[in-house]
Every structure is written in structure tokens, then in C-alpha cells.
């Protein structure tokens, strides 16, 4: 399947997990588009990761804008690549969409939900906008629509039927992070809904444990689990089992996504799964 993954659209590309996947994709010859509110910030981050200027110029199109603007989202999903290897320069729907959009946590005067986000619905809103944009593209494509797959960065601690948290982290996740987790759950529902409405071919919902900065430890350090049902209703039957752990680096998450989903030889094993990653 890796040979089929010619183009990838990135949302939230300046975030650590998504940035790591983008950097490896560009460096390895994949044609990528990225929506960015501040394009220079993204370019600076790629330079810091030693992505060559040649690779960036050849393989990346940056669309200035934000994910709540449907025109910007559609331009990211249908980029125009300047490289001669793409043939003509007409806009073309990407093969894969990746979203790692998030918001900054902040404290609030609420004992029940002490932590919120600067933008408490950004993950849900981004996923819904991507699905809406794909629906509009589908309606106007003259019958040529080929739905892309979508990779979405979620979190552990939100599955109703599979425990993917150590017991020691349950109070932190279920109390302190209730608002961010609600947004991730709503995002998962929107992504799965896109598959059900046939504007997405499949989803790969990645649920890392507590994300940390720092260097990647490498694939040998990453433990992986997967379950068959996202946004589960309590009591649903679930196939598979998650990996249970405390932390993982953003770099290792992004690298795993590239190695196993973007360029993987057995991508089908992860299709329509919720994939937990941890050390």
C-alpha cells in the first residue's frame, strides 16, 4: 500500500507528532500539503529537524489559513504541486489525510473540570470541517471522487470498554483531563462518521499515552495495541487489546505513524482500528 500513498494532507503540522510524520514523509519523497496559520513557523521547525530545503521545495505545499475556513481546508485536501513529477498542475485530491490538531490546556475555576483548553472543541471542529470539505468535493467532482484515508491523533483514557491506562493515571485522566478528552471523543466520532458516509476510505485512530517532548527512543521501545471499535458504547464487544503504559514521546508517535501507516507494508492490519502507543 505504501506505493499508493502518493499525497498526504497535514492539519496541525506544527504539533510534535504530526510534524515528525511530515518531516519523514517529505524527506522520503512523498508529496505533502500542510495547512498552517504561520507558514514560517512550520518551515523553521522542518529546518530544525534537518529536512533539506530541496526536499521542502520539491515535496511540500503550505496553505496559509486555519481549519475553520472551509476554502483553506479544501485547498489543503486538493493541493496543486509544482513538481514536474506530478504531471499537470491541476488540483488533485490527496490519498491520505492526517490531523494532529490540538489546543493549549489552561486552568479554570471549576472543581469538577479544573482543566480546559483555549479552544475546547478544536479537535472535533477540525474533523467535522475536513469531513464537510470532502463531502463538498465529492458533490462537485463529476463522479471521480476517490475517498482518502485519515490518520487522527487521539489519546488513551477515553475508551469505554478497554482499559488502556495504568490505574495510577486514572484520576488524572478521568478528572483532570475531562474537557480535552471529551473533545478527542467527539473527534473520533466525526472521523468514524466520515468513513460511514463514504467520504473517508478508512481511519487510523492513534491513541498515544501521555505525550512528552524529547528525542525518539526508536521503534524497539514502542509498545503497540489495537482495538476494533472507536467511540465505543459501553458494553459493546471489542476485538483486540490496547497497550497500557504511562508516556511516549511525540517524536516516536510521529515516526511510528510514518513507518507503519504512511510507508508500511501491512497497512491493512491497522485500518479502522484505535491504535494505542506507549513505552
Image: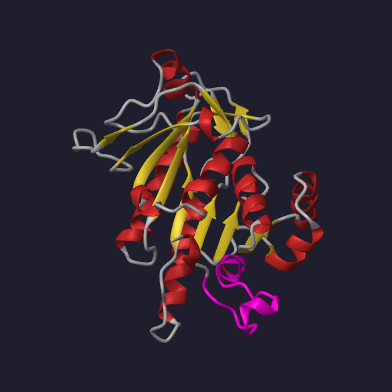
Image position of 62 (left or right of 170): right
Coordinates of residue 268 in the picture (x, y in percent)? 35, 54
Q: Position of residue 63 (x, y in %)?
A: 68, 65
Residue 196 point in image, percent of width and height = 30, 60
Seen at 28% across and 43% down, the residue is: 228
Residue displayed at 41% across by 77% down:
145
Q: How is the image coloured?
A: secondary structure
Q: Is residue 118 left or right of residue 196?
A: right
Q: Position of residue 54 (x, y in %)?
A: 79, 63
Residue 119 shows in this picture = no
> Which region shows up in magenta?
71-93
- In front of the other: 77 or 124: 77
Comparing 255 with 135, the one in front is 255
Which residue sits furthest top?
168
Q: Indicate left or right for 173 with 59 as reference.
A: left
Give the total number of marks visible in the rendering: 0
In the visual, does 11 lie left or right of 48?
left
**Residue 117 is inside the magenta segment:** no
**Residue depicted at 49% across the width and 18% down the height:** 111
* Residue 276 vertical position relative to residue 88 in the rendered view, above or below: above
In the rendered image, the quadrant that contains the N terminus is bottom left
Inspect the magenta stretch and tell me whether residue 90 lies in it. Answer: yes
Residue found at x 65% / y 82%: 89
Q: Is residue 164 visible?
A: yes
Residue 243 figure quarter: top left
| Residue placed most toward the observer, 215 or 117 | 215
Amino acid at each position: 500500500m505504501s506505493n499508493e500513498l502518493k499525497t498526504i494532507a497535514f492539519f496541525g503540522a506544527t504539533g510534535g507528532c504530526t510534524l515528525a510524520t511530515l518531516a519523514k514523509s517529505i524527506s522520503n519523497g512523498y508529496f505533502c500539503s500542510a495547512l498552517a496559520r504561520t507558514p514560517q513557523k512550520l518551515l523553521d521547525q522542518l529546518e530544525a529537524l534537518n529536512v533539506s530545503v530541496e526536499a521542502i521545495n520539491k515535496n511540500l505545499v503550505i496553505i496559509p489559513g486555519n481549519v475553520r475556513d472551509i476554502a483553506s481546508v479544501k485547498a489543503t485536501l486538493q493541493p496543486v504541486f509544482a513538481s514536474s513529477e506530478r504531471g499537470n498542475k491541476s488540483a488533485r485530491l490527496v490519498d491520505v489525510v492526517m490531523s494532529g490538531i490540538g489546543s493549549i490546556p489552561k486552568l479554570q475555576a471549576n472543581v469538577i473540570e479544573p482543566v480546559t483548553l483555549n479552544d475546547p472543541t478544536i479537535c472535533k471542529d477540525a474533523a467535522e470541517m475536513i469531513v464537510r470539505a470532502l463531502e463538498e468535493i465529492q458533490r462537485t467532482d463529476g463522479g471521480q471522487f476517490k475517498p482518502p484515508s485519515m490518520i487522527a491523533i487521539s489519546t488513551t483514557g477515553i475508551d469505554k470498554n478497554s482499559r488502556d491506562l495504568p490505574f495510577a493515571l486514572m484520576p488524572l485522566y478521568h478528572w483532570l483531563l475531562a474537557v480535552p478528552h471529551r473533545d478527542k471523543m467527539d473527534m473520533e466520532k466525526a472521523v468514524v462518521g466520515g468513513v460511514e458516509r463514504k467520504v473517508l476510505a478508512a481511519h487510523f485512530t492513534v491513541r498515544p499515552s501521555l505525550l512528552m517532548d524529547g528525542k525518539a527512543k526508536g521503534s524497539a521501545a514502542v509498545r503497540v495495541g489495537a482495538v476494533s471499535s472507536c467511540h465505543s458504547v459501553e458494553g459493546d464487544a471489542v476485538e483486540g487489546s490496547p497497550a497500557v503504559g504511562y508516556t511516549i514521546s511525540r517524536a516516536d508517535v510521529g515516526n511510528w505513524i510514518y513507518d507503519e501507516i504512511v510507508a508500511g507494508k501491512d497497512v491493512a492490519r491497522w485500518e479502522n482500528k484505535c491504535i494505542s502507543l506507549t513505552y
